[in-house]
Amino acid sequence: MKVEQLMTRNVETCGSHETLERAAAMMWNHDCGALPVVTHHDGAARVVGMLTDRDICMAAYTQGRALRDIGVTTAMSQRLCSCRPTDAVGVAFRIMETNQIRRLPVLDAEERLVGLISLADLGREAAREHGQAGRQVTETSIGEALEAIAAPRSGGALMARV
């Protein structure tokens, strides 16, 4: 099974020049938790980062400023991981697990955004395939991916509940 069979198309994006207030409003209005951040160059939108709802919260907390006063580029992840629409779903799984990310932009050969594949997309496919022979995505593969993604990063501090 290929990524293009499961990915979400017509993905909402935000510009690198936007504020976190605008990005948060976009996430709220489109019921999503992440946006690819794009910049326009030579008439084409190029993905330059990813912004999650957690990134927005942490930027507001650490900078102590209103969201309207914080630029997207200060909060987004600039380390971009992506896959191709023609990649096998297993490739997307490995990229997500290795980089501990739940959503992956899908870029074409010219590096243009054509979709987004998420752990939720993969989970829906596992549910759809449930009970079928020759399954491409299983509950076990989803569980293993989630375990890898949610594992504490090395060097990170864990807080104990009191």
Image: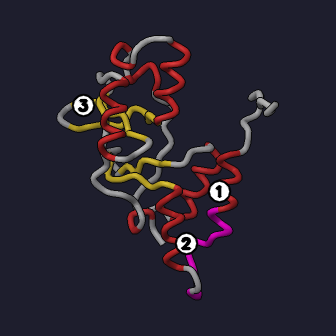
Q: Which residue is mark 1?
A: 145
**Residue 136 occupies quadrant:** bottom right
Mark 2 nearby-residue class (10 Å; few <14, some 14–19, many ≥20): many
128 or 112: nearer the eye? 128
The mark total stands at: 3
Secondary element under disc 3, as helix, strand or loop, is strand
Proximity of marks 2 and 3: CB atoms separated by less than 8 Å: no
Above or below: residue 55 compared with residue 145: above
* Residue found at x 49% / y 48%: 103
Mark 3 nearby-residue class (10 Å; few <14, some 14–19, many ≥20): few
- For the magenta stretch, what is the residue range? 132-142
Residue 36 spot, x, y in % from top left: 38, 39
* Residue found at x 65% / y 47%: 149
* Residue found at x 52% / y 79%: 129
Is 96 on the left-hand or right-hand side of 143? left
Q: CA distance from mark 3 to mark 1?
A: 33 Å
- Whichever of labels 2 and 1 marks the residue nearer the N terminus, that label is 2
- Residue type at mark 2 is Ala
Q: Which residue is mark 2?
A: 126
- Whichever of labels 3 and 1 marks the residue nearer the N terminus, that label is 3
Q: Is residue 141 magenta?
A: yes
- Whichever of labels 2 and 3 marks the residue nearer the N terminus, that label is 3
Residue 113 spot, x, y in % from top left: 33, 47
108 or 25: nearer the eye? 25
Secondary element under disc 2, as helix, strand or loop, is helix
Q: CA distance from mark 2 to mark 1?
A: 13 Å
Q: CA distance from mark 2 to mark 3?
A: 36 Å
Above or below: residue 58 compared with residue 51: above
Residue 40 spot, x, y in % from top left: 24, 31
Q: Which residue is mark 3?
A: 40
- Residue type at mark 1 is Ala
Q: Tell me, for residue 93, which label it has, or none.
A: none
